[in-house]
Amino acid sequence: MYYQRIVLKLFIPAVCALIGACATKPTFVIDPSTQQTNVKSSASITVIDKRPADDRESSMGSLIVTSDRYGIYVLGDERFVPAPTVALANRAERVLSSMSQRPSSVTITLNRFNTQNNIQTAMRHGAISASGLGPLGVTIAEGMFGKMREQNIDARKPFVLTYAEMAVEFRWPDNTRITRNITVLKANNYSENNLEEQKAIIAKTVSSALDALATGLKSAGTR
């Protein structure tokens, strides 16, 4: 019980600082209104959302320091304006309208789009000193952040991460069909003491992931 109380004291304030306030959950504008204009292509665009509920819904990570969910807060669709699926459809319209050879239809199946606030390492350092776990927590954390090095992420500091997977099927009037899988990972560090910076970095990370998906879409559909 003593250990659980210590972890709870560490976890709750950190998450509250991370999201700004526990009572009021800020929303993040990933597309300015000027980018949400009705740009329509001649192609029929269908977005099928097949993401797991864990990607779509906000949730708080585990309170157990050895869990891989410790110190992670998932930001669900309700936290973004517009919702990621809407923002993706808007980008698809813009991309296809700029293509010289446009397909007659595009089907986008969104399998993953998960955005996380991550303060895992910072919290593990605090839990280590309080619980007597020694270097165990640090070792676990270091192993988990290997892939983040490609994004130039300092895992010792808070960061936001967006991971996305989508399958795309293009169809042309001549009955040509192309299918592609596109995977994107974007991540950025931010200061936990600056709420406005947090909001800007979160919006930037999600927007850049959507932009990368749109770039992949254009590349995959170019003949």
Image (spheres, rainbow, N blue to C red):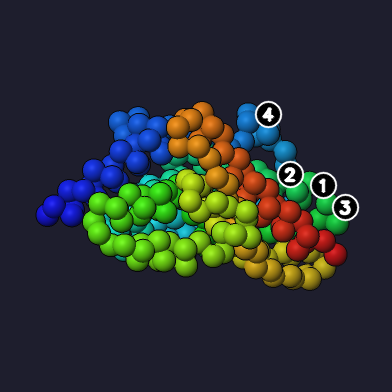
Query: Which residue is depicted at the point 65% across and 43% down?
Result: 90
In this view, which residue lies farthest toward the left? 1
Q: Are marks 2 and 1 in contact (CB under 8 Å)?
A: yes
Query: Which residue is depicted at the point 35% across and 41% down?
Result: 15
Number of residue marks? 4
Q: Amino acid at mark 2?
A: Arg
**Mark 1 or 4, closer to the camera:** 4
Query: Which residue is depicted at the point 41% across and 66% down?
Result: 139
Q: Are marks 2 and 3 in contact (CB under 8 Å)?
A: no
Q: Which residue corresponds to mark 1?
A: 98
Which of disc 3 and disc 2 is earlier in sequence? 2
How far apart are labels 2 and 1 at the CA level?
A: 7 Å
Q: Is residue 144 above or below residue 14?
A: below
Between residue 192 and residue 59, name the one nearer to us.
Answer: 192
Q: Amino acid at mark 1?
A: Ser
Q: Residues within 10 Å of mark 1 (few under 14, many from 20)?
A: few
Q: Which residue corresponds to mark 4?
A: 34
Mark 4 lies on a secondary structure that is helix
Question: Quadrant of the rendered structure where residue 132 is?
Answer: bottom left
Q: Amino acid at mark 4?
A: Thr
Q: Residues within 10 Å of mark 2 (few under 14, many from 20)?
A: many
Mark 1 lies on a secondary structure that is loop
Q: Which mark is residue 94?
A: 2
Between residue 212 and residue 88, name the one nearer to us.
Answer: 212
How far apart are labels 1 and 4 at the CA level?
A: 18 Å
How far apart are labels 4 and 3 at the CA level?
A: 24 Å
